[in-house]
Image: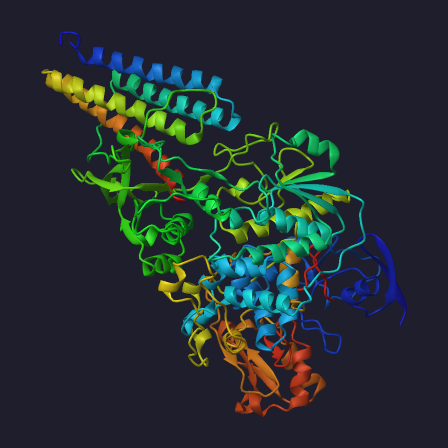
Amino acid sequence: MSRWNSVDEVLDFAIAREQEAVDFYLELAAQVASPALREMLQDFAEEERGHKEKLLGVKAGNKLRGADAAVTDLKMADYLVDVAPRPQMSLAEILILAMKREKAAFSLYTRLASMISDPDVRKLFLALAQEEAKHKLRFEIEYDEYLTEG
Amino acid sequence: MEPITFTIDGKKVTVAAGTTILEAARRQEIFIPTFCHNEKLKPFASCFVCVVEIEGRPGLVPSCSTKAAAGMRVVTASERVRRARRACVELLLSDHEGDCLGPCMTTCPAGIDIPGFVKHLAEGNDRAALELIKRNMPLPALLGRICTRPCEGECRRQLVEEPVAICQLHRFAADRVAASGTEYIPRKAPSSGKRVAVVGAGPAGLAAAYYLQILGHSCTVFDCHEKAGGMTRYGIPSYRLPRDVIEREVAVIEELGARFCFHTRLGHDITLDGLCAAFDAVFLGLGAQSAKPMSIRGENTEGVLSGIGFLAASSRDEKMKIGRRVMVVGGGNTAIDAARTALRLGAEEVSILYRRTRAEMPAWQEEVHAAEKEGVRLDILAAPVAIAREADGALQVTCIRMELGEPDASGRRRPVPQEGSEHLRVVDNVIAAIGQDVDAADCPGLKLTKWQTIDADLHKGTTSVDKIFAGGDCVTGADIAVAAVGAGRRAAVAIDQFLRGEQVIGEPGIYNHTMGKIREVDPKVAEGFEKVRRAVMPELPAGERIAGFSEVETGFSEEAVRREAARCMECGCRDVNECRLRAYAAEFGADQFRYRGLKRSYERDDSHGLVIYDAHKCIQCGNCVRISEEVLGTCAVGFSGRGIGARVKPALGRRLVEVDGRQIEQLVENCPVGALIRKDDAVAALEVDFHRPEPRRPK
């Protein structure tokens, strides 16, 4: 994988992905019928923008600390069925969509880390994967809360 | 003496020299609160609640002992005075131990006067009990069978042995009156000529209609189903709630004049805009009627049912094809009801899969036990992840085992799948009962939350549209029926205010001083009570009950009811309607916890034949001590000790029981709180006119 020659290249890739996520949520927010869900999606976009800022900070010299311990995996993203974005989405569907996006990002970074020999770049990919696992957990917990009544 | 002239709140007042500001104000009917002032006694100036402002003087002065002077300008109601009075009341509250209202009553989401109605039952007054219950909750026979009884969780009788069977007692009161042949129909206010549309004939809508009719308005109740009851009819099997019980209580609402229109669905047969145009106000009690999806593969396979769909079909006596092996998914009451119904419809192996632990099951534990007794198997910490149909039509369910993970940031332990725990189970039906969502899609123009519930004020039911009110599950998400009933009643009060053109403030906030939750209460409150076992609800034998849908719980005998009702400890204060501390706390918006510190301990003396002395409620105003000295000329009672440890005690080392009856009557009369109360005073029903919220102002 000659594409990843430096830490900066990896960061640029990750930053672009976060921006994609911002755009994705904003686009979906513009589509959904419910004003409250629109607001929630705008908040998600804001969170993704925060992630992007964090990575820009890393590029500028801040340290990206991976999680101290393994991030809990509730595995909901594994067994819940895929949902396609559409205007009449429910809260639960949006959460499923979001956790699956985070899971995909986690898998991508983990896979890339396994292909890289440069130890610094590898470490960075693993730290990014951990970040995505944390984001996924946040959505899984919210889904778990949604399920608590039953 | 020469008269003098001065002003109170800008009003010119002429009084004889030597008159106190308090006396002068009272003659002008200007309200000044006080605890320690008593016209029979010399001024004492100890409580300081009567403080007023005198222009030109830096500090506030007690009006009970300050004499009016010529030209003085007195202000009795400035913000500064109110703040000072509030602080004085809060200081007294900080050392006052007791409950204004029984904790059962304040815990009940419908606010039923539980100690009051239980007392009536103990004395054999079933009709009076029912009338008191229906002041706050119009469905006692219905909820007496299905309520999850949050009240009993706070019942202080647990500190002796077990909580009083409150819920089953109100069932008795309702059943008894119904069996007498003359239902209780409350009196109605004169007709207002206003019309209200109530959408949904579930607990919230029924409660709203009941109170709106009583308040003089004319309701039309719309429901998409063919009969009233909402989730209580279509989500709860008849072996727990016989249908004639629902009919009976709905008939009372019809008798009050409400009209019911069934088979009428919002968004199809009627619209919100149409209702707003045709009625003066609209109440939405739509419930939470759409089953939460499991969102796993194969969910739509034939043979997979939703819990509420299954229960509704069974409730309508639709021919249900249910297999021999049934798996129910979920841990709430719907899951338990679905499992027990499946057994009654002929299933032989019924299991319930729940992804958390037994302790976390939202279902009522008694129902869980009943299900197990009938043969339902509980499979906890397990969840389905995919369903496939086999060639023979059976369902192959892939399940995983869970374990609780480490507590997360919120402190909650989440179920985490165990590695390699996937296993297959073969069943004939899967019933998914993992909760219900609100479907408010047919409410265009109304502000919804992200859960798609109606964004409404929980106290008043007001929504983003002026004449539309809402309450119950469609606002809170799926919750217990008694909470919906409370919401329906509160909304009725707000709608009434709206229809009369008044400010919509809802029911008045009721000030309640509390000893705290059951875990925080001094165990001494249980002293002196003999242990008496809680009455056990008779049930049909397990073998007999799964053969059909006969009511499982057959009801208490009269003898059991009288004995059970007598177990009530009568928590709550008998002086609740007269207590000045409570009235002033409400008046000044006091907070009992603002000056939380060392508090007096629970100390009751009921040795006297006529009175009870609750030393923990005494605020040391000194009225009783001074009455005994200055009026009676005896030393019936006096202060013993100093500071926070000071107590009012019979003087000369006597015991309370030795105080003369006529003397003690005088002391009781002059106690401004409930520290000294007559034994023959019944447990007081709270006299709040929920339609007129101004706090009372005792002199």
Q: How many marks?
A: 0
Q: Quadrant of the N terminus of chain B?
A: bottom right
Q: Looking at this rendering, what residue extends furthest in the left direction? A: A117
- Looking at the image, can residue B46 be seen? no
Q: Position of residue A23 (x, y in %)?
A: 39, 15
Q: Quadrant of the C terminus of chain B?
A: bottom right
For the residue pair B448 and B345, the one nearer the viewer reads as B345
Does B38 sit above or below residue B401?
A: below
Residue plotted at (21% across, 39% down) = B424
- For the point 42% across and 66% down, the residue is B540
Residue B504 percent across, percent down from the top left: 70, 44
Residue in the picture at 57% in, 71% down: B118
Residue found at the very far top of the displayed protein: A2
Q: Is A107 placed left or right of B554 in the picture?
A: left
- In the rendered image, residue A88, in percent from the top left (x then y), is placed at 48, 24
Whether residue B271 sits left or right of residue B616 in the image: it is right
Q: How is the image coloured?
A: rainbow
Residue A44 seen in the current view? yes
Image quarter of residue B182: bottom right
Residue closest to the eye, A58 or B310: B310
User: For residue B264, what is the image quadrant?
Assistant: top right
